[in-house]
Amino acid sequence: MSSSVEHLVSREYKYGFVTDIEQETAAVGLSEDTVRFISAKKEEPEWLLEWRLKAYRRWLEMTEPHWPNVNYPPIDYQGSTYYAAPKNQKPLGSLDEVDPKLLETYEKLGIPLSEQKMLAGVAVDAIFDSVSVGTTFKATLAKAGVIFCSFGEAVKEHPDLVRQYLGSVVPANDNFFAALNSAVFSDGSFVFIPKGVRCPMELSTYFRINAANSGQFERTLIIAEEGASVSYLEGCTAPKRDENQLHAAVVELVALDGASIKYSTVQNWYAGDENGVGGIYNFVTKRGKAMRDAKISWTQVETGSSITWKYPSVILQGDNAVGEFYSVAVANGRQQADTGTKMIHLGRNTRSTIISKGISAGEGQNSYRGQVKIMPGAEGARNYTQCDSMLIGNRCGAHTFPYIDVRNASSDVEHEASTSKIGEDQIFYCKQRGLNTENAISVIVNGFCKEVFRELPMEFAVEAQKLLGVSLEGSVG
Amino acid sequence: MALLHIDNLHAAADEKPILNGISLTVNAGEVHAIMGPNGSGKSTLAQVLAGHEAYDVTAGSISFAGEDLLDMEAEERAWAGLFLAFQYPVEIPGVSNAYFLRQGYNEIRKARGLDELDPIDFYDLLEEKLKVVEWGPEIMERAVNFGFSGGEKKRNEILQMAVLEPKLAILDETDSGLDIDALRIVANGVNTLRGPEKAIIVVTHYQRLLNYIVPDFVHVIAGGRIVRSGGKELALELEEKGYEWLTSEAAVA
């Protein structure tokens, strides 16, 4: 008799449509000229061009990392386009001037950009391929002294802030993909919360890859000054295409003394089809620096991408700094995810918490990779790590690679790990109570992820639950 | 028309025969006890009725409320009003009892063409049903069976039964692992759910539970067959004599 837990075809990716819009793109390939082209397009100051070129030259000397537990054919870095933007981009006075086709695209994605229709209390920056197409609620935020704009705009309007903090957490030569991003990054979001200000609304960036054969290299920089606080959420989707597309982003967070940054991600890039054709390579560097009494919290729900390589990290530099990482990562179909975090304890009495929930289904391979490093000066530092894996079916894999490096005897590090197989008994129990198989899986998996979902901003927790249901739909039959 | 009619049921797990020709008719309003030694096939019968995929039905038929039960998925059997109180209730971490039960309750209502109940109305219903098992509302926020004691798990099964109001409830060794107080609560709960429209099958090793839930019929299973049927006095006879006289008779037959 056939086992009830076996793979069937996944359901359609509902964000897989393409927007037909005239594009302006850079020539295919990557050289110093490409870097200059992008910088010129964005009318950047000389120092930034130099910064990019330096990164590019370093990148040439670096090699792509192959230590992650993922497999993919070699990437042809000369075969892709590094800049794509909808044509007729003028400086926008207001959202009314945005190309209606773009507004329509975001409507279709469930992200209406007109402020009347927006979720109350959430400001959105919409990034379409290489550029930001609009930011909502800017005036409201400005009143509180909060700057929330596209990265390109920040370079023009707030060059000193950008220059002071760009690369201060993730240096241009940090790693292969970060160096690539530093050379060719196109746009992204910029957030600045001045001293003592609690950002009056949730901030959100919505990333959309549309152009074919192009990479997306966005750069996000969030600065919370002393005592400031902000909650930020990013969402991502892309059309279904047969070729793989590279997404190499860099996110830097700076939390000064007593500041607090909560950064949430709902990543739903196209994952490729059931045979592993197409999908986004999501190779992302995210890191935050927490000064004295500051707190940085990463929450991620990673359901998309064919390959994920991502380790949102916190450098706990100041005394009493707090770092948190809450993650749900799904690998279904042929998806491969190698994700986790790094918590680097430098200050005294620094604390970090890692809760990782990996779900593997179909032929998906899910790896948790996490580093906890307690440096000699981190007196009384504490870390708690909980790393749970769930397997659905018998052709998927879950892997755990914890790195624990403790150089201070007064610290306290805990690591708990579990692996469970979604039981036929659990499913049968749910079915006997009237739930069909898909509902049963959804209930069981959502229960498994509860500790992470409750960290998401309210408006998005429900979305994330639905998304998870959709990603796993059809994973058992 | 019988609520449940089992005819010459044969079932196997991993090609090993376990049920070897069970025939049984249960009418609405009746309580049947199924007894028998370990490994006789009692629990298998309960699992097969509920639609567990680990068992293959190799021969025979089952009709339930006029429909072919073997043609139905496990959840369709639940929608049709069949309930199994599990011998080993399953834990579902992170999912609250209230949420879980509301999902099941609403799925069953949907299948019957009724409107779903919102969380507030459902809560009112729950408050009533909690009295059946003498529980306070705190239990509803705990994850389904997670960290529950053996007795709490069994009580939770009865609570679920009270909420879902099945036409046929099958209690699979619900008495095992219960202390005397929990046994009383569980049995009282079951008795309040008895009615002329409903039937109950009690699967048990011991006569003890039948002092509380008094059956109309008692059947003894051995070797995957019903070897003796009788009234409630049969249970007392078994208590006194054990199973051996029946199982050896079965072997001879």
Image (cartoon, coloured by chain):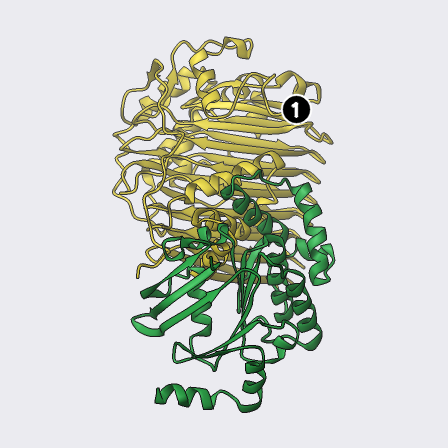
Residue B227 placement (x, y as % from top left): 42, 80
Snapshot quadrant of residue B198 = bottom right
Amino acid under label 1?
A: Val
Chain B colour? green
> Is A453 positioned to the left or the right of A389 in the image?
right
Q: Considering depth in this image, is B34 or A146 the residue closer to the camera?
A: B34
> Is A399 positioned to the left or the right of B211 in the image?
left
Residue A145 placement (x, y as % from top left): 69, 22
> Is A246 positioned to the left or the right of B83 in the image?
left
The secondary structure type at the circle numbered 1 is: loop
Q: Residue at x 42, y 75 (%)?
A: B41
Q: Is residue A146 visible?
A: yes
> Is B196 positioned to the left or the right of A206 in the image?
right
Snapshot quadrant of residue A123 = top right
For the C terminus of chain B, which image quadrant? bottom left
Q: Considering depth in this image, is A176 or A117 the residue closer to the camera?
A: A117
| Chain letter for the yellow colouring in the rendering | A
Residue bearing mark 1: A146
**Count of numbered labels shown in the rendering:** 1
Is A347 situated above or below A283? below
Is B94 situated above or below A97? below
Q: Considering depth in this image, is B231 or B78 the residue closer to the camera?
A: B231
Q: Residue at x 70, y 60 (%)?
A: B132
Is B135 situated above or below A321? below
Q: Is residue A375 visible?
A: no
Q: Callout 1: residue from which chain?
A: A
Report crowding for label 1: few under 14, some 14 to 19, many 20 or more residues within 10 A (C-alpha).
many
Residue A435 placement (x, y as % from top left): 49, 49
Q: Residue at x 38, y 48 (%)?
A: A475
Q: Considering depth in this image, is A312 or B250 the residue closer to the camera?
A: B250
